[in-house]
């Protein structure tokens, strides 16, 4: 019974996890055809832009940036061994994982036409999520 409960909880958690592809699909369905200015008002300004030959712009947008430091940790393991005279023994090993900085970010390339309407969105960089998610972009754009 306990195993079934754990499996059901794990399945529920994973069902809420979204991928980069799902986030990209959500971004495209919500923003393609909309004003690039509206996107930037809602999500923050672009970090750079380049003119297109057609008169539009290609923007690089970055959002959801955060950084945390995971504290260091020790792991103790007991390993069964055998002495030279055949007696059984155990050896204790201790390993240390130093503190680690983890960065979170979602970055997208947004192509807008000459009128400023978004024609395409491509996620160019997506870290894992901060909150039990596979995708930082998904945390920012999949509302539901």
Image (cartoon, rainbow, N blue to C red):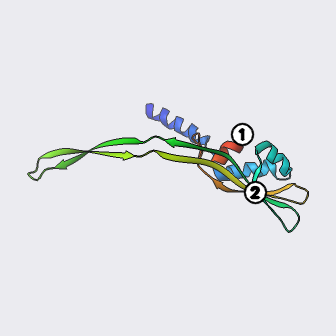
All told, the count of numbered labels is: 2
Vertical position of residue 74 compared to residue 108: above or below? above
Vertical position of residue 118 compared to residue 129: above or below? below
The image's mark for residue 36 is none
The residue depicted at 60 percent of the width and 45 percent of the height is 129
Where is residue 94 drawn, in percent x and y? Answer: 30, 44
Q: Are marks 2 and 1 in contact (CB under 8 Å)?
A: no
Viewer-side label of 2, 1: 2
Label 2: element kind = strand
Spatial distance from mark 2 to mark 1, Cα to Cα? 26 Å
Quarter of the image with the C terminus in it:
top right
Label 1: element kind = loop
Residue carrying label 2: 48
Neighbor class of circle 2 (other Cα within 10 Å; few <14, some 14-19, many 20+) is few
Where is residue 126 drawn, in percent x and y? Answer: 63, 52
Residue in front for this viewpoint, 135 or 46: 46
Quarter of the image with the N terminus in it:
top left
Whichever of callouts 2 and 1 sits on the residue coming sooner in the sequence is 2
On the image, which quarter does residue 131 sit in?
A: top right
The residue depicted at 53 percent of the width and 35 percent of the height is 9
Q: Is residue 33 left or right of residue 91?
A: right
Neighbor class of circle 1 (other Cα within 10 Å; few <14, some 14-19, many 20+) is few
Given the current orientation, which residue lies at the most extreme top position? 1
Residue in front for this viewpoint, 127 or 82: 127
Where is residue 114 drawn, in percent x and y? Answer: 90, 60
Residue in front for this viewpoint, 61 or 138: 61
Residue carrying label 1: 143
């Amino acid at each position: 019974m306990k195993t079934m409960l754990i499996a059901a909880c794990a399945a529920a958690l994973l069902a809420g996890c979204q991928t980069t592809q799902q986030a990209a699909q959500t971004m495209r369905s919500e923003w393609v055809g909309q004003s690039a200015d509206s996107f930037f008002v809602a999500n923050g300004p672009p970090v750079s832009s380049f003119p297109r030959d057609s008169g539009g712009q290609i923007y690089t947008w970055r959002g959801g940036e955060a950084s945390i430091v995971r504290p260091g940790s020790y792991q103790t393991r007991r390993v069964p061994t055998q002495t030279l005279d055949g007696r059984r023994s155990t050896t204790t090993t201790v390993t240390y994982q130093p503190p680690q900085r983890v960065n979170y970010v979602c970055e997208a390339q947004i192509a807008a036409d000459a009128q400023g309407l978004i024609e395409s969105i491509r996620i160019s960089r997506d870290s894992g999520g901060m909150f039990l998610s596979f995708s930082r972009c998904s945390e920012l754009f999949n509302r539901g």
